[in-house]
Amino acid sequence: MDTSATITRATDVITIPLRYCLYARKSSEEDERQAMSIDSQINEMLQMAEAQGLNITEIKREAHSAKASAQRPVFNELLQDIAQGKFNAVLTWAADRLSRNAGDLGSIVDLMDQGFLQEIKTHGQTFTNSPNEKFLLMILGSQAKLENDHRGVNVKRGLRAKAGTGWRPGMPPVGYNIIKAAGVLGNKIVVDSERAEVIKTMFKKVGIYGYSGRMIHKWLMTETTFTSRGGKALSLSNIYTLLKNPFYYGQFEYPAGSGNWYEGKHKPIIDKTLFEATQLQLKAPYEERAQWGSKEFHFTKLLTCGACKSGITAEEKFKPLKDGTRRRYVYYRCTKFNNKDCSEKYLREEEMVQQLLAIIDTIDLKAIATQRKFQQELERFRKFAKGILGHVSDSITANKQIDIRMYAKYVLQEGTHEEKKEILQCLNTKLAMKNQKIYIC
């Protein structure tokens, strides 16, 4: 069989030998399950080439979807080789192996118009650089695109229908697995018993105990063996994504960002109350947030860690109450600046105050600066009472011994941040915290 192309120019007839490139493609997507495998395509085409005497100069294979134009590396290389004259003919199983989109189809036809591509041969058809055959090639390519578009619409419709029944399409988040199920709706989502309890604990630590994302990350890394389904540890961003996913309490949005919410039929790992408490902690109002290191607590910078001599810092946690409000707790701990493995535990501020009050009872306050500070405060109040209230209480003006110790205890319990700080500085003693106990160094 003659495998050359003939070009007529006036009275001259020029015959160009055809150099074929065998191109085989298979997409891994759902919509091409019925297509032949790459090896099957190549075997069939080689048998056809041998029977018809076709000159195959190279074989190109590719596993890539042809839905979008200019996205297939091997196909783009094929077009470049044709434009450079390396090949002038293509052998492929079917026209839709070359293109399922208008952009790539246009590139092929353009090469034919310019004379670079003389022939495309499939298992049942041949397309040359003639108007009728190019038109037929474009029809087949457009038909493949139309099938793709219809298939995409039908798939999306089916996925929306599945979401409407309460089953989220696609892979569920970590903490859930998919099991095979017969019927139209397909697979079902079940709780991953190995990971569900850890995930529930993560929500509790944030929503109830006020853990930050970094604290959760550290807890996962040091106290659990929790990993993703792929066996990898969760990154900090993965943790925040997990904690913000309403799927865990039974709701999901599909498609993402569409605003279409569904009640899931899968079993929730947490309840909605805990989820909302977690979001409240993660998305605290702006005015409650402080720049890192800018928030001051009453007793930081006044104590040191008795174990490693690092400083003492504090963290605040918020616990949601049934009436919708939140209760604030402050915990003091070692900064671990000198020893990152320091094992000193947290101490709540209320307990710290009680221990400081006990320390006040053991200190001789008569000769220290606290007495002078108390006299100054007493004089300030006397002026306030006389100037604003118009009188001075007998209890204030009475010549009685000043109870400095009572004043110091009052300030530690009821004073402002600055007043508490001044009182402890006036004690002229160094304080340390070890084993959740405050003591004088």
Image: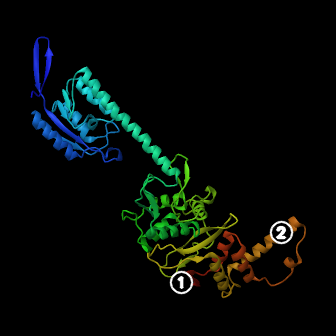
Q: Is residue 436 above or below residue 194?
A: below
Quarter occupied by the N terminus = top left
Q: Is residue 73 left or right of residue 49?
A: right
Residue 410, quarter of the rendered image: bottom right
Residues at marks 1 and 2 touching, judged by CB atoms closer than 8 Å: no
| Residue 387's disc number | none
> Which is closer to the viewer, label 1 or label 2?
1
What residue is shown with label 1?
435
Q: Nearer the viewer, residue 197 or 356?
A: 197
Query: Percent x, y for residue 114?
Result: 23, 23
Kindly report the distance in space between the C-alpha atoms of the residues bearing marks 1 and 2: 45 Å
Outermost residue toward the front? 183
Outermost residue toward the right? 390
Local crowd size for mark 1, using a 10 Å CA cut-off: few (<14), some (14–19), many (≥20) = few
Query: Is label 1 in a helix, a strand or a loop?
Result: loop
Give me the residue at 35% from left, 34% from top: 145
Name the kind of residue labelled 1 in the image.
Asn
Q: Is residue 154 above or below residue 282?
A: above
Name the kind of residue labelled 2 in the image.
Lys
Query: Which sits earlier in the primary sequence, circle 1 or circle 2?
Result: 2
Q: Nearer the viewer, residue 213 or 353?
A: 213
- Mark yes or no: residue 101 visible: no
Give me the residue at 56% from left, 51% from top: 261
| Residue 383's disc number | 2
Query: Is label 2 in a helix, a strand or a loop?
Result: helix
